[in-house]
Image: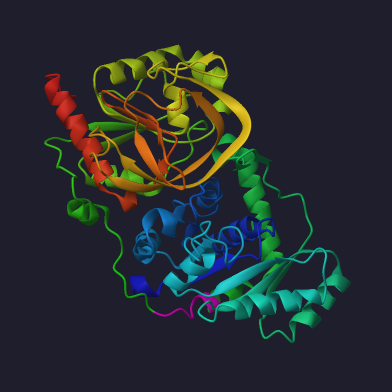
């Protein structure tokens, strides 16, 4: 089987809340338990669902976001992530045709399905309907003839009689029913203000939930029919994305003169990271060393640069604050001029305080939780040369938080936002680049190259090495 012909399905829904994550994660786990190598993917910028996907399959959950990375990169990134798999399953986002606000189909599940030439299985919340389900599915199947809606899984079915009525209605739709799942709260995944609770925060319970989802899917879905459908896909003509090749092509991505060690924050407080970031850092010549700010009292030995991604530090502010030795080590690294890239949760961790709890004190700002959700895609430009981006570098990113920082920008801001609003945001100070903006580096590999080269230069300037 060539890489372009990997069997694949897109699991979509008419709207959020229909049960996409339940069904997609259950299918991933059920097929993996059956002995298949399953590659998990998620449409959109979400970090949390891929954690459950990874738990279900044993492979990194990967995102496919046409807004952040561009439509032309979707198939290459998919082929890179799915290399060596027997089956790839792609969980959609929101409703099937919902995309970036005001931009048509851009970043929608439907667009990704078309770019992957993949059949779509629609998960329908059948809890409050019977015959109407056929009309709903007919509308979705006929809306865009380029989208191949090839099957339906009925979710939240109430009884045997309810299922019988639903199947009778669907007989005339021309779209086969490939599964029916009963209402069941036992395998739920807890949520909080930004969505599901990440796997890293509830691993033992998450393992049990995923196992229960797999059992429900095995009992209620026709796995053989789903796998047969996945194998009807055409060949994708694209070449797989390669971090080294794309880094070499990126403008402004200088080669590092040595192999610096870049520490990457992880653990329960910092779960938001795209798998491609570590791959790009390694391709740029770095040694990547993960660490957990909740547990480790020092940075990895020989750290020459630091990446702190997103997550839920507000849930762990007391514990992060209590780890004073690590906070001091982070502050000392930043003061040395070494590059530090921080996104969202990382930005808060570098501030003076979070909800009154002392943080690293690298940035002259105070952070706090609020009731207001800040959410949406952004376009931005780097306003100055810094450790992460050359001046003028344009990126697309995503903002997603319920916190506020005062002030919201330093004397040298990290980004100038250009769409959908114009404002400055974040901090550049010495080697520090800190911002609320989440950026997918696969769209701009020069960021990884710049960071690694900055680490090497900073070390040389200090007259040291590891």
231, 117: nearer the viewer: 117
Q: Does the magenta-highlighted stretch encompass residue 153?
A: no
Outermost right residue: 161
Residue 230 among those drawn in magenta: yes
Res 416 seen here: yes
Q: In this picture, is 119 found above or below 56?
A: below
Majority secondary structure of the magenta segment? loop
Q: Which residues are magenta?
A: 229-234
Vertical position of residue 177 compared to residue 360: above or below: below
Q: Residue at x 46, y 22 (%)?
A: 407
Question: In the displayed structure, does residue 250 sit left or right of residue 174?
Answer: left
Please say if 17 is above or below 333: below
Q: Which residue is painted at 84% across and 64% down in the image?
A: 158
| Foreground pick, 401 / 302 | 401
Question: Looking at the image, which is closer to me, 236 or 388?
Answer: 388
Q: Is residue 7 visible?
A: no
Where, by quadrant of the figure, is residue 447 drawn? top left
Q: Position of residue 15 (x, y in %)?
A: 66, 61
Pick the quarter of the image with the N terminus.
Answer: bottom left
Res 402 quadrant in image:
top right
Q: Quadrant of the image for the C terminus? A: top left
The residue lying at 81 percent from left, 72 percent from top is: 163
Look at the picture and state if 77 lies above or below 290: below
As rendered, which of 366 and 260 lies closer to the eye? 366
Q: x, y percentage for residue 259?
A: 18, 35
Q: Residue at x 45, y 19 (%)?
A: 365
């Amino acid at each position: 089987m060539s890489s372009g012909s990997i069997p694949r399905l897109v699991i979509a829904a008419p709207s959020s809340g229909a049960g996409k994550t339940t069904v997609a994660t259950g299918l991933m786990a059920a097929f993996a338990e059956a002995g298949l190598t399953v590659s998990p993917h998620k449409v959109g910028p979400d970090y949390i669902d891929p954690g459950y996907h990874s738990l279900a399959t044993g492979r990194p959950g990967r995102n496919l976001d046409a807004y952040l990375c561009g439509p032309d990169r979707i198939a290459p990134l998919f082929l890179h992530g799915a290399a060596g798999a027997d089956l790839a399953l792609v969980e959609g986002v929101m409703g099937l045709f919902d995309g970036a606000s005001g931009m048509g189909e851009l970043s929608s599940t439907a667009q990704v399905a078309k770019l992957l030439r993949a059949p779509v299985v629609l998960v329908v919340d059948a809890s409050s309907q019977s015959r109407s389900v056929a009309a709903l599915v007919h509308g979705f199947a006929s809306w865009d003839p380029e989208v191949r809606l090839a099957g339906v899984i009925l979710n939240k079915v109430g009884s045997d009689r309810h299922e019988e009525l639903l199947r009778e209605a669907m007989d005339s739709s021309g779209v086969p029913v490939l599964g029916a799942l009963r209402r069941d709260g036992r395998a739920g995944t807890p949520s909080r203000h930004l969505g599901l609770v990440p796997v890293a925060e509830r691993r033992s319970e998450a393992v049990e939930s995923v196992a229960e989802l797999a059992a429900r899917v095995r009992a209620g879905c026709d796995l053989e029919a789903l796998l047969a459908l996945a194998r009807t896909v055409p060949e994708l003509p694209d070449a797989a994305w390669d971090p080294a090749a794309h880094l070499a092509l990126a403008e402004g991505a200088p080669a590092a003169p040595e192999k610096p060690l870049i520490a990457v924050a992880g653990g329960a407080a910092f779960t938001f990271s795209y798998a491609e970031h570590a791959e790009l850092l390694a391709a740029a010549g770095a040694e990547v060393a993960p660490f957990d700010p909740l547990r480790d009292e020092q940075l990895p030995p020989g750290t020459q640069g630091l990446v702190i991604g997103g997550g839920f530090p507000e849930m762990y502010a007391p514990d992060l604050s209590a780890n004073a030795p690590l906070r001091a080590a982070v502050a000392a690294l930043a003061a040395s001029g070494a590059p530090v890239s921080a996104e969202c949760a990382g930005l808060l961790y570098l501030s003076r305080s979070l909800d009154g709890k002392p943080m690293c004190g690298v940035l002259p700002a105070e952070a706090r939780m609020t009731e207001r959700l800040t959410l949406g895609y952004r376009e931005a430009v780097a306003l100055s040369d810094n450790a992460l981006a050359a001046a003028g570098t344009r990126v697309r990113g995503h903002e997603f938080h319920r916190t506020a920082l005062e002030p919201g920008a330093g004397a040298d801001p990290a980004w100038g936002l250009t769409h959908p609003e114009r404002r400055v945001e974040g901090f550049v100070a010495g080697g520090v680049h800190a911002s609320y903006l989440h950026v997918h580096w696969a769209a701009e590999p020069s960021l990884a190259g710049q960071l690694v080269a900055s680490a090497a230069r900073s070390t040389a300037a200090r007259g040291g090495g590891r």
